[in-house]
Image (cartoon, helix red, strand yellow):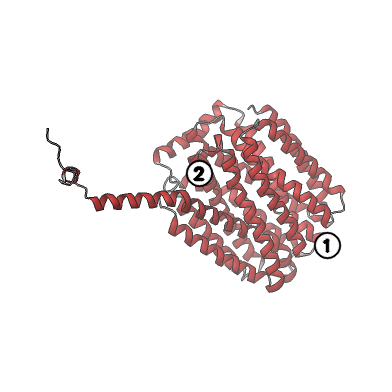
Amino acid sequence: MRRLPSNSGFAPAATGVSQPAVALSRQILNRRIFYSTFGIPTVAAFSIFVGSAARAIPVLLAVPIQRDLSWAESDITGPIAISIAISAVGAPVAVRGLARVSARSLLFLSLVVLAMSLALSSLATSPWHLLLFWGVGIGLSGSLSTAILAVIIGLRGCAGHCGAALGLFSSTQFLGTAAGLLLASRLAEAFGWRAVLSAAAATTLIAALAVLLVLDARDGRASPQASATGRATFPRVTARKGSIWIFAAIFFICGASTTGLIDSRLGILCMSNGLGLSSSADVLAIIAVSGGIGSAASGLLADRYSARMLLTVYFGARGIALLWLPFTSLSLIELSRFGAFYGLDAALTFPALAKLFSRNLHQQDIGRTISWMMVAHIAGAAITSAWVGFLGTANYAISFAVVGFMCLLAVGLVRISGD
């Protein structure tokens, strides 16, 4: 058989695709690979960094706003507790919405709602303004971001075997929180709290625009089949594995001892004991930076050692630290020392918890069921924040003691949860 010459044009005629079209398709493919490898993770990390920084600002500015407007303490602490509660209630609704919209849409909506809430908070003149903008707006934004974190864990499969990747991803949140606290405290002292809220709103809008331009509309979208599987999965897992309620209790205690007691209240405690705005922000930033280091370290540890053993150490050390702090003088040095240790310990928990929990689930179950565990986490934070605010700063020793004993209870729950 006579071989056709290479320039006969046989191949293009048979396939119906010209050489320029093939080159263009390769260029588009390479561009998609580039965006998937570099662009999407970078923009996602940037948006999470900015969102975490912006959400940390209200906790820091609570006392300056209270003093500037001569409000009661409950007028400031109430919206913070409501914000956490709305995050818990809205998270499962947002997760169900992933069956119809993409993670890009939820992330964009979360950042826009956060930006609007911060911008409108800068105009606050009455307590109900913060109740609406902080309590509802920032709470709703937090629930959307919780859903996004859950779907990333589920669709990327990080919970079962990628502790290091999950740890590095979580560290972005901590570093964003530290940056937001340090910048906000300095800007507030120079320009006032209203200017800080306005600047944070503008930066958040920039992050939302980056999400809209770079992320693909199909990224992270759950299929209807997966959604149907997820709806039926949670009751089936509950019936098959009673320890799911043990995990829910562990996540509840984890949220109570981190977001509920420390993240939302420690800044107020620092300023109530005579520390200035910058010093209080430094203590909170130390917690966040230690959390970033601990989150990355925990991912590596979770890939190498028993998750149950790690969680026993983490919760035991956390409980002892909480029981120890009320017996100190609450000076800047001792609060900083506590913050460095506690931030490290608190960040160590989540990769090990996700890894331990995911061992009982199929891959398609992880994202949706962990989202329910995160609801338990936020519920613990909301309830703790509410009753600690009700007791007031004069009874912080009681609050720390109760949550400390809860952490010791979590040690026992971890030991009976299985591995």
Quarter of the figure that contains the C terminus:
top right
Q: Amino acid at mark 1?
A: Gly
60 relative position to 241: left or right: right
Residue 7 point in image, percent of width and height = 17, 47
**Residue located beneath label 2 in the image:** 151
Instruction: Identify the element where label 2 is drawn.
Output: helix
Q: Residues within 10 Å of mark 1 (few under 14, many from 20)?
A: few
Tell me the number on the disc at residue 398: none
Q: Residue at x 72, y 43 (%)?
A: 345
Q: Residue at x 75, y 61 (%)?
A: 73
* Mark before the other along the chain sequence, 1 or 2: 2
Q: Is residue 136 visible?
A: no
188 relative position to 147: left or right: right
Q: Amino acid at mark 2?
A: Val
Residue 128 point in image, percent of width and height = 64, 64
Q: Residue at x 63, y 44 (%)?
A: 296
